Amino acid sequence: MQSALEAQQVLRWLMVVRWLALADLVLLIVLLVASFANNEELVQIFGLTHGIVFLALIAIVGIGAVQKLWSWWFVVATLITTGPPGALVGEVLIARKAKAILTTSKGDTSDR
């Protein structure tokens, strides 16, 4: 990630990552509550939904790594932490770097 255009693209992808990670987090919490309450019906419904959203999250983070929007540590962190924790922390760190690049590039163009 070096140019302002690349940084903007990264931020757009990270918005998708953020929403998927938050949805996955909510589904995971509901799944855990249903599991502790021994509610098999809710566990089946939210387990499947959580699984699908988790796979979508891993896919988006993986596609971003293949496109070199970020490095593979983001995929590994998301996978190891079972989704939301790694995705949200990684999203914040990568977004901070992208925003710094945008700020720097705006400062460069205002000097002209």
Image (spheres, helix red, strand yellow):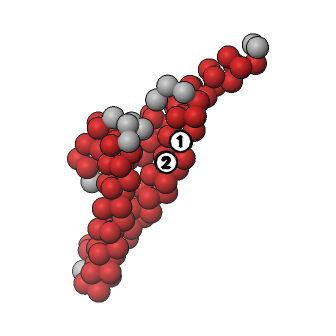
Q: Position of residue 26 (x, y in %)?
A: 42, 64
Q: Amino acid at mark 1?
A: Gln
The residue positioned 27% from the left and 54% from the top of the image is: 82
Secondary structure under the numbered disc 1 in the rendered image = helix
Q: Which residue is mark 1?
A: 9
The residue shown at (35%, 73%) is 49
Q: To which quarter of the image does residue 75 belong?
A: top left
Amino acid type for the residue under numbered disc 2: Trp
Q: Which quadrant of the figure has residue 86?
A: top left
- Please state which of residues 49 and 41 is positioned toward the viewer in this rendering: 49
Crowding at mark 2 (Cα within 10 Å: few <14, some 14-19, many 20+): some
Percent across and percent down for residue 23 are 44, 63
Where does label 2 land, which residue?
13
Mark 1 neighbour class, 10 Å CA radius: few under 14, some 14 to 19, many 20 or more: some
Q: Is residue 35 above or below residue 59?
A: below
Q: Is residue 79 above or below residue 20?
A: above
Q: Position of residue 10 (x, y in %)?
A: 50, 40
47 to 111, vertically: above or below: below
From mark 1 to mark 2, how far is it between C-alphas?
6 Å
Which percent across, then down, holds residue 92?
47, 38
